[in-house]
Image: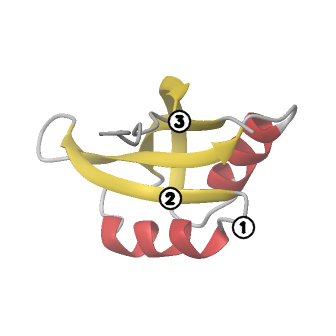
């Protein structure tokens, strides 16, 4: 089955939220079929930062809704913004 990568901007609930704690919580709430692959901090304004996370999931009906709910229900998360969704690239094995 095809796997998708969703890039999501996650805004903290409070200006003084510890983003590393939020990232650790996000990594623990993901399931076997939804995983956080990578993350980075992104400056917003006036010293505030957001988390940009890449989440890997199966291309099944309802998976994106599940992912959004998992993220929104995580402590320390304010709002989310889906930046991009694409198929995970597959490396082709060479026959040569």
- In terms of sequence position, does the residue under pointer 3 or pointer 2 come before the other? 3
The residue pinned by badge 2 equals 36
Disc 1 designates what residue? 32
Between the residue at mark 3 and the residue at mark 1, the CA separation in whole angstroms equals 16 Å
**Residue contact between numbered discs 1 and 2, judged by CB atoms under 8 Å:** no
Residue for badge 3:
6
> Based on the displayed image, in which of its 4 quarters is residue 20 positioned?
bottom left
Left or right: where 49 falls relative to 60:
left
Callout 3: SS: strand
Which quadrant of the figure contains the C terminus? top left
Is tag 3's residue or tag 1's residue first in the polypeptide sequence? 3
Q: Would you say 45 lies left or right of 63 here?
A: left
Whole-Å distance between the Cαs marked 3 and 2?
9 Å
Q: Residue furthest front?
A: 96
Q: Are marks 3 and 2 in contact (CB under 8 Å)?
A: no
Residue at 52% over, 70% down: 27
Q: Position of residue 65 (x, y in %)?
A: 78, 37
């Amino acid at each position: 089955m095809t796997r998708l990568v969703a890039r999501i901007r996650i805004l903290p609930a409070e200006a003084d939220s510890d983003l590393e704690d939020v990232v650790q919580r996000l990594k623990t709430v993901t399931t076997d079929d939804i995983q956080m692959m990578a993350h980075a901090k992104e400056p917003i304004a006036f010293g505030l930062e957001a988390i940009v996370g890449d989440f890997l999931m199966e291309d099944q009906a309802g998976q994106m809704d599940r992912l959004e709910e998992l993220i929104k229900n995580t402590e320390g998360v304010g709002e989310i913004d889906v930046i991009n969704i694409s198929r995970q690239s597959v490396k082709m094995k060479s026959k040569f």
